[in-house]
Image (cartoon, rainbow, N blue to C red):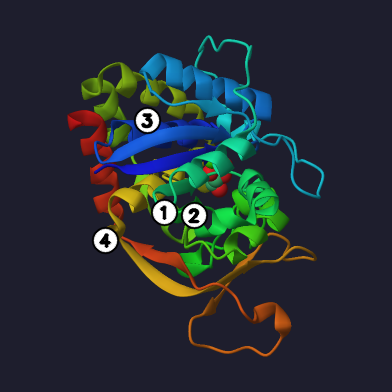
Amino acid sequence: MPQKIIIDTDPGIDDAMALLFAHRAPSIDLVGITTTYGNATIEQTTRNARYLVDRFGLSCPVHMGSGRPLFADPEPPADFVHGSDGLGEAGLVIPELVDDGGDAVAFLIDTLRASPGEITIVAVGRMTNLALALSRAPDVASLAKAVVIMGGALGRGGFGGNVTPCAEANIIGDPHAADRVLRASWPVTMVGLDVTMKTVMTPPRVDELKRRGGETGEFLHAISRFYQAFYTNNHGLEGFAVHDSSAVAYVLAPELFTLEAGGLRVVTEGIAYGQTLLAPAGKRYHLPVWQGLAEQSACVDVDSDGVLDLYMSTLLDG
Ligand code: RIB
Ligand code: CA
């Protein structure tokens, strides 16, 4: 039985890579896409999601989500990473939004209620929609099979943050929402920079996608030129980090990841704004903010070649 997933996403170049990865994986049934903001505005990410669905035949609905954080002012889109259109300025003709598909939060709630215990939410952008779903319908925390997030960092392997020394983009973009999501009683696995920065898609692999991957491979090659330039110029990397697809890889092959269990929280004020922290399972802390936390998991290591090989085989042989 394929695993039913909803992807909450801000396409976004690596989001597009993750969506097509999930679409091509035979053991995943992508039942819906909900959009969030970050890599581009909510209108643009929704247009991009719809473009991907239409062009590549993803048979699932797209629902537009919240366009701003719960409490903070929205930051400008990360166009220096993903381009002004969010998809790498590759000359795509992306239609205007005529219908936003309705309320993403309502879709999340209704879908979880309709299939209790069956749906995994893969959240690879700001977690505002998930936090709103928890507020509007607290029962959803007991209805999701699992929540896999791409976001955060625990500082393992030297990766503490990509926006500040200790904060990752999806978390700092709405830390209050992320804290709510990580504290909820649904089972969360955090796929953070600790593993995604170690998983680097190199030029030979992207070239192979272009050569052997048909229209999808050519598209992935085209949109990732901008992303590659960002990683070369800012990180000196020959290749780019596999962020959002690592969350999909975790759903497909959790054995590729090493986990640590514990309570997860997000810093919502001060110099460490947006930092994710893990309170190791079994350790007791006496301050109230560290008590009664749900036991969640965080990925602290990964078989990077295994993730990359899985991506390639799914796109090329699937
Ligand atoms: O920090 C990486 C994350 O931020 C990815 O999800 C990327 O798409 C952006 O949303
Ligand atoms: Ca993303």
Image spot of residue 116 (x, y percent): 44, 51
* Residue, disc 1: 117
Q: Is residue 311 above or below residue 270?
A: above
Image quadrant holding the C terminus, namely top left
Q: Are marks 2 and 1 in contact (CB under 8 Å)?
A: yes
Q: Residues within 10 Å of mark 4 (few under 14, many from 20)?
A: few
Q: Nearer the viewer, mark 4 or mark 2?
A: 2
Q: Is residue 253 left or right of residue 71?
A: left
User: Mark 3 sits on what residue?
Assistant: 20
Find the residue positioned furthest to the front: 114
CA distance separating discs 1 and 4: 21 Å
Which residue is rendered at x = 64% and y = 11% of the image?
A: 98
What residue is pinned by disc 2?
143
Is residue 234 among the parts visible in the rendering?
no
Residue 198 in the image: state x and y as whole percent.
39, 55
Q: Secondary structure at mark 4?
A: helix
Callout 2: SS: loop
Marks 4/2: CA distance? 24 Å
Left or right, 277 with respect to 251, comes to right
**Mark seen at residue 255:** 4
